[in-house]
Image (tube, rainbow, N blue to C red):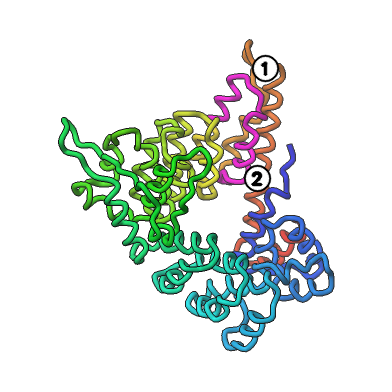
Amino acid sequence: TAPDLAELLPQWLAAACAQGYRAPAELLPALLYAARARTDLRARALDLGGPRALWLARFNPDWRFALRGRSGYGSGPPRADEAAVRRLWEEGLFAERSALLLSLRRRDPAAARELLAGTWAAERAEDRLMFLDSLREGLSPGDEEFLERALDDRSRNVRATAAELLSALPSSALAARMAVRARSCVALDRTGRMDRLVVEAPYECDPGMRRDGVAPGAPPGRGERSWWLTKVVEAAPLDTWPAHLGGRTPAQITALPVADDWEADLHAAWAQAAVRQRNAAWARALLRKPSVPMAAAPGDPARLLAVLPAGERAEWAAEFIAAHGLSEAFRVLGVCAVPWAEPLGRAVVDALEIARDAGSYPWSFSGVLGLAERCLDPGGADRLAPLAAVPDEPEDGSPGAGGYWAEAFQRLVATLRLRATMLAELEPPGDGGPARGRAAADGL
């Protein structure tokens, strides 16, 4: 029933870094070893360690990741030291160059793009692909010219990545070309008793489509025309469709029947476009109501949910859990903001209590319980304390399940109380604030 401190370490590091703390010097070796073992800790651990952690890492080969990893450069080299930036870019190891590019991209996207463009032709194909992927950070219309040139790259993977990035820019020339193709594939049929959508998928993957990132070969088990249709539609700006389909809203468009069994392909492509273009209106329309089973939504419902604002996400997830229980809730909960909003936290606890009262064992819900320990509002620990008592077991329940549930809730309550204490220790310095922060660092 004791809290798992290792599971709380990412949250503790994030809170400590947000308050501007630095790790005590004597704890830097332990911090670096922890970051070496867990990549999810590295960025925050190196932030907390500061320059001294990077200095120390030079003396132990086990800590070399701190010098090579992306997070090891923090905010990057000084702005004025352009010669050092150029020297590192031209002479550094790949990981060092990748770290530099991402760091510079966060600070000055145009400068990072120009740095990459200067050596682009001489880079290896696999390096070009990784460097190009860094342009996702701060992607903007200013990147279009460079990405358009990358559409003619020798590497198929580089061309495909450039096309994907351009399709995330609805104002790009590639997006406009895809919009023309998409409109030729999907039309509104008004001839029947009710309007419907008709689909005419491409009959070939012409050179222009291939240059714009549509692979001519479909994956195993997928028809070529279906594949080409989805790649064209998912790359077209979603703003194309209301005007093309009679001024309808996304919700009205997705409610239209689709002729000849093309609905699954068309909606899946729109779902991918909604995620790529971060379009909440389309994500909301495709996600459907929380009462509808998750399988009814196209694509990955969790990715669609992640596009919505945090408050709406929590409300949708709470209603989904109330309607369907916890069996499909894990991925949905994973994209909700932490700490969970009150309606969502209440829905999760209610569902856990229902599962307990049904007499099942708690390990069937271990994933959700683990998330609850890290994501519930820690201020609610006292309200959950009564659940830590051993309940009466139903006659048809699993033997001993009540005792196991009591232990699970005891651990949940203990973890929430520890999180509350942990966050209080890291509050902005007041009377004795820095000492409290150091004590928190020493404790974890």
- Residue at left 31%, top 62%? 176
Residue nearest the observer in this picture, 207 or 413:
207
State whether the magenta stretch is mostly helix, strand or loop: helix
Mark closer to the observer (1, 2): 1
The x, y position of residue 106, in whole percent, is: 53, 71
The x, y position of residue 421, in whole percent, is: 66, 51
Would residue 374 appear left or right of 1 to someone viewing this image?
Answer: left
Quarter-wise, where is residue 88 in the image? Answer: bottom right
Whether residue 349 is situated above or below residue 77 in the rendered picture: above
Residue furthest right in the image: 60
Residue interval drawn in magenta: 351-378
What amino acid is at disc 2? Arg
The x, y position of residue 329, in whole percent, is: 53, 36
The x, y position of residue 227, in whole percent, is: 43, 45
- Residue at left 57%, top 43%? 376
Give the CA separation, mark 1 to mark 2: 30 Å
Residue nearest the observer in this picture, 147 or 432:
147
What SS does tag 1 mark? Answer: loop
Which residue is denoted by mark 1 in the rendering? 398
Residue furthest top in the image: 395
Would residue 199 appear left or right of 413 to someone viewing this image?
Answer: left
- Residue at left 65%, top 68%? 70
Magenta-drawn stretch contains 354: yes
Quarter-wise, where is residue 142 in the image? Answer: bottom left
Which residue is denoted by mark 2 in the rendering? 417
- Residue at left 35%, top 37%? 263
Magenta-drawn stretch contains 74: no
What SS does tag 2 mark? Answer: helix
